[in-house]
Image (spheres, helix red, strand yellow):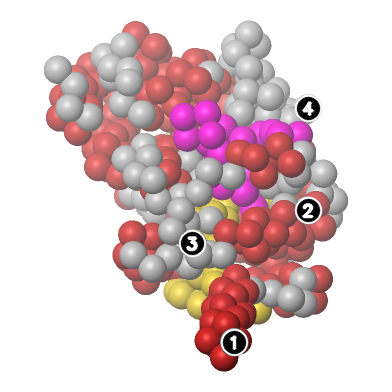
């Protein structure tokens, strides 16, 4: 009898230990600055209040250090929740079996509808491995007063209207477009949008994945459209001499009228200039191509080696609500990925939110997030070479094709 009692006590203790472990949710969060840390801590506090049976153990790690440490966590003793990026950066770990398949959570929580525009970026081989949290829009910033002076009555919606606006701006003595090409990623934004508008997101993603040759006529078509803008002197002179911070003053000083960029720069506009800045969707080039947008997306994931997946799924469901998505977006200076979240009140953010929510052709993650880093680096160096001399299209594309074959091991 004593042995039975002792065995029963041991079994009860073991069960209690398992229950205790199961009730602790381990969360690792990458952050930049005190504001981001605060909004994540507030979100965790709200989850704890709604789920008092769950103990939360959180580690906040500065973003650059987080990037270095993440592979080690995922392959050894993983936390239950991590935050990261969608697109290729997510697929890199999903393809190695390091992230949990959360496709059933998408179905259960109705995310196919509320996160429709970011579903593709949350997927790998048809399964979902992420919950999007926030993203930001890319589009064309412009000076309203300069447009008016140049006789441009409305924001260009088509490519022909855009080219006409550029022509009028140049005739009025203002350079149509500012770009800081020393930061090669600013050029990548131009490549992405021209490719998305000419060839569509499905083609774009195949190209990003190394499945299409850079010598393909459709890729050359992108560079040819870009060449027209450069050869017509629609960009500022010596664009490769400026980084983003160096290029923005061209707008503020009235020397340039437009800039293709993400909405995150809006917070840095001078107070007296902000009311005079407008923002519109990158023009449609081919109406037959489903409209896709750039929307680099942040996300949360359950590592495949997480020990408390049940509570991790509860946390995903909590964060996936419209209210929490909106709260994170406001605190992180971004847009809510949930299309059912309240629209932002700030004018440019509101336009960006509407553009992304209506992206029927999908949302791309941006050039260097949609492909392997090595190929992205080669591609952006090629863009700088092209901008320096547009007569070298074929040379640049041939060099990129050689890089593609080497990096992706294509014959």
**Nearer to the camera, 123 or 333:** 123
* Other residues around mark 4 within 10 Å, as few (<14) / some (14–19) / many (≥20): few
Nearer mark to the viewer, of 2 and 1: 1
Dot 4 corresponds to which residue?
A: 153
Residue mark closest to the camera, 2 vs 4: 2
Say which of 88 and 227 sits in front: 88
Residue 56 - label: none
Q: Residues within 10 Å of mark 2 (few under 14, many from 20)?
A: some
The answer to whether residue 365 is magenta is no
Q: Which residue is mark 2?
A: 321
**Do the residues under discs 1 and 3 have CB atoms within 8 angstroms?**
no
Q: Secondary structure at mark 4?
A: loop
Of label 1 and label 3, which has the lower sequence position?
1
The residue drawn where x is 31% and y is 11% is 216
Contact flag, marks 3 and 4 (Cβ < 8 Å): no
| Range shown magenta | 112-138
**Other-residue count near label 3 (Cα within 10 Å), few / some / many at <14 / 14–19 / ≥20:** many
Q: Which residue is mark 3?
A: 306
Q: Which residue has dot 1 on it?
A: 1
Of the numbered discs 1 and 4, the one sitting upstream in the chain is 1
Please state the horizontal and vertical placement of residue 230, each as a whole percent of the image. Answer: 40, 27
């Amino acid at each position: 009898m004593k042995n039975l009692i002792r065995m029963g006590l041991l079994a009860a203790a073991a069960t209690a230990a398992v229950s205790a472990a199961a009730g602790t949710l381990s969360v690792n969060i990458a952050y930049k600055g005190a504001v981001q840390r605060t909004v994540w801590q507030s979100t965790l506090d709200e989850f704890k209040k709604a789920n008092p049976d769950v103990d939360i153990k959180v580690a906040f790690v500065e973003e650059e250090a987080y990037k270095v440490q993440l592979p080690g966590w995922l392959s050894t003793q993983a936390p239950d929740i991590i935050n990261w990026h969608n697109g290729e950066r997510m697929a890199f770990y999903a393809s190695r079996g390091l992230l949990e398949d959360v496709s059933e959570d998408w179905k259960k929580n109705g995310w196919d509808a509320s996160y429709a525009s970011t579903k593709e970026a949350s997927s790998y081989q048809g399964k979902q491995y992420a919950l999007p949290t926030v993203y930001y829009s890319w589009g064309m910033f412009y000076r309203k007063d300069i447009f008016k002076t140049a006789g441009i009555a409305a924001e260009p919606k088509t490519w022909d209207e855009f080219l006409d606006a550029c022509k009028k701006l140049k005739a009025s003595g203002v350079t149509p477009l500012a770009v800081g090409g020393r930061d090669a990623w600013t050029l990548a934004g131009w490549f992405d949008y021209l490719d998305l508008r000419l060839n569509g997101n499905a083609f774009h993603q195949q190209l990003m994945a190394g499945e299409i040759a850079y010598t393909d006529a459709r890729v050359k078509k992108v560079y040819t459209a870009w060449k027209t803008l450069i050869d017509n002197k629609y960009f500022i002179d010596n664009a490769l001499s400026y980084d983003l911070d160096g290029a923005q003053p061209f707008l503020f000083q009235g020397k340039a009228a437009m800039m293709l960029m993400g909405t995150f720069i809006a917070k840095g506009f001078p107070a007296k200039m902000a009311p005079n800045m407008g923002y519109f969707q990158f023009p449609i080039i081919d109406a037959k191509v489903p409209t896709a947008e750039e929307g680099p997306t942040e996300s949360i994931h359950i590592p495949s080696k997480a020990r408390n997946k049940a509570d991790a799924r509860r946390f995903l469901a909590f964060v996936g609500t419209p209210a929490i998505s909106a709260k994170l977006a406001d605190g992180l200076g971004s847009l809510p990925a949930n299309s059912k979240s309240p629209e932002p009140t700030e004018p440019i953010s509101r336009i960006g939110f509407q553009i992304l929510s209506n992206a029927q052709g999908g949302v791309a993650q941006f050039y260097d997030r949609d492909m392997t880093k090595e190929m992205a680096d080669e591609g952006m160096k090629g863009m700088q070479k092209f901008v320096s001399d547009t007569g070298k299209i074929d040379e640049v594309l041939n060099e990129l094709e050689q890089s593609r074959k080497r990096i992706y091991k294509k014959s």
